[in-house]
Image (cartoon, coloured by chain):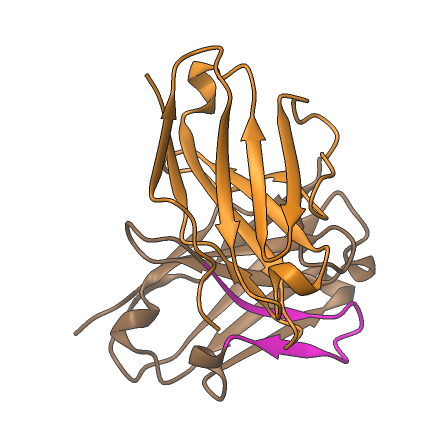
Chain colours: A brown, B orange
Amino acid sequence: EVQLVESGGGLVQPGGSLRLSCAASGFTFSSYWMSWVRQAPGKGLEWVANIKQDGSEKYYVDSVKGRFTISRDNAKNSLYLQMNSLRAEDTAVYYCARDRAGTLAFDIWGQGTMVTVSS
Amino acid sequence: QSALTQPASVSGSPGQSITISCTGTSSDVGGYNYVSWYQQHPGKAPKLMIYDVSNRPSGVSNRFSGSKSGNTASLTISGLQAEDEADYYCSSYTSSSTLVFGTGTKVTVL
């Protein structure tokens, strides 16, 4: 079964750090661009970052540039999001998603992991 | 990058057709044929319904169709069913090699 499973969410204080993980199974992980997408409570979807198959290209939404880092380990079929200098506005469910063909259309999504930034 | 503009809500009776618009700029919707549409039920992850403006993934009902004219993309749901009640989001590739989502539309089946 093709599947993405996120982990690592939780409660963190403003200014703190958190590392999210996404475990992929059922497909050749190394063949796909991957993205992180977040959704604040009661709000819409926001694309956060993506990474090329070999990790050589990475792109970020302006609001997280310099604070978040996307990475992957193809040997472990895993995607990561290192989040530093967290702010209240980063509070959201974070989804990892598979890009079906490199055009930022996401055909497989994880169940999401909740990140809450609060003192 | 500002979010693409969608109507906050659209409603229709069972069997009717509805259309959701998604308006951007020449730097996103108008500049590329990389518009996607997602359906999201409460508490669930989004589901891809349309990609590359008008293509349906395997398993998605042919009642869902997409199109684009200039800076505005559209999703049409024909033969509206109760299970179609959900939030819908468009998205587009941008000139900055990033992605922008729409503001989201709540579809209500009357």
Give the position of the N terminus of chain A as an image quadrant.
top right
Q: Residue A79: which quarter of the image?
A: bottom right
On the question of residue A66 being in view, the answer is: yes
Give the position of the C terminus of chain A as an image quadrant.
bottom left
Q: Residue A113: which quarter of the image?
A: bottom left
Q: Is residue B46 above or below residue A13?
A: above
Residue bounds of the magenta highlight: A46-61
Residue ID at (25%, 73%): A88
Estimate the x, y position of residue B85 in percent, counting from the top left. 41, 25
Q: Nearer the viewer, residue B27 or A113?
A: B27
Estimate the x, y position of residue B52 in percent, counting from the top left. 72, 48
Count of residue discs: 0
The answer to whether residue A27 is magenta is no
Q: Is residue A112 above or below residue B47?
A: below
Residue ID at (80%, 73%): A54
Estimate the x, y position of residue A32 in percent, counting from the top left. 77, 58
Estimate the x, y position of residue B59 in percent, counting from the top left. 70, 25
Residue projecting furthest to the front: B70
Q: Is residue B31 above or below residue B23?
A: below
